[in-house]
Amino acid sequence: MITSCTHPHDRPHDRPIAPFRVADRLRQIAEVMHRAALILVLCASPSSYTTSCRREAARQICLAALRPLVAFTLLWTLVSLVLIRIVMVTAQSYGLSAFALEMVIRVLVVELIPLFAALAIGLRPSADPTAATHATAWLGNAWRESVVARSVAAATAVMALATISGAITLLTAYLNAFGFSLWGLGDFTRSVGQVFNLATTLGFLGKTVLFSLTVGMLPPALAMVRRADTAASGRRVSDLAAMLLLLVMIETIALSAQYV
């Protein structure tokens, strides 16, 4: 009885060669960027905002911003209170109390708040656009209105949380430094003005806008190019990892441009 034998080098490879995998990954990244640009154009186009789209956008903004607002605000207030107190006490013990307030404003308000607001909106359970799993749905008007509403709502929620948390952090810092009296308002305003110069203000606004666009445009763009044979849990984890990576890259670039 003759048995056929196949040489190991003649067996077909189940996995693609490394250069082809890199090329496929680059193609997917380019496709995601292309889809995100299309979604951005749709969100910036006035013709996208029909009556039903405006109604859906208002509903999505309430879901995205108002639901996590109380919990995020309370949690961030507690965290900022603890961090501000630690910084103030440590600075006083080393004789650096004159720089403590500026350091608190620069670290918490300028650097941490936009990132934490983007993570709070991007990592929430309802952030996954399940309606965007089929590429053919891109041609549907109802799907377009849903994507525009979700993207605008997520971007608006990030900016709203960052603004409210920044105001609460400034109020908490003032109360820790000067108490409930108004005599320190001039010194506090001077410290805030020294931190928020033109370069810092532009960097803060630019970083917040980029975080908002990432949270708003990236999930539907990833959903449009994801593979149909990927499990739902695997898609969710990979999408969150991609969003987190992009947010960290934006934060790193902003820090390098600001301080290096």
Image (tube, grey):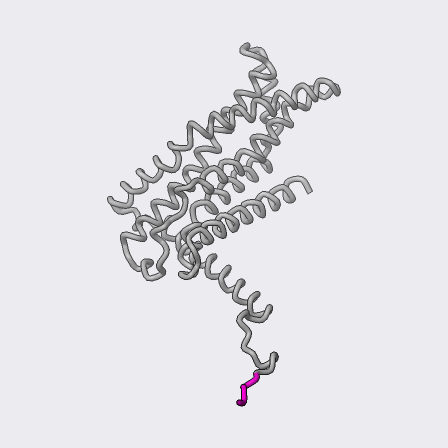
Q: Which percent across, then down, holds residue 233?
A: 44, 51
Q: Is residue 185 magenta?
A: no
Task: Give whichever of 237, 200 is nearer the camera.
Answer: 237
Task: Give whichever of 196, 132 is nearer the camera.
Answer: 132
Residue depicted at x 61% and y 16%: 177
Q: Is residue 2 magenta?
A: yes
Span shown in magenta = 1-5
In this rendering, position of residue 183 left or right of residue 125 = right
Q: Which percent across, then down, holds residue 160?
A: 43, 33
Q: Please tell me whether residue 258 is drawn above or below residue 14 in the rendered image.
A: above
Q: Toward which corner of the image does residue 38 lie, by quadrant?
A: bottom left
Q: Is residue 245 visible?
A: yes
Q: Which percent across, then down, holds residue 75?
A: 50, 27
Q: Please tell me whether residue 215 is drawn above or below residue 180 in the rendered image.
A: below
Q: Toward which corner of the image does residue 54 lie, by quadrant?
A: top left
Q: Is residue 44 visible?
A: no
Q: Which percent across, then down, holds residue 16?
A: 55, 70
Residue depicted at x 42% and y 41%: 125
Residue depicted at x 54% and y 77%: 12
In this rendering, position of residue 32 left or right of residue 139 = right
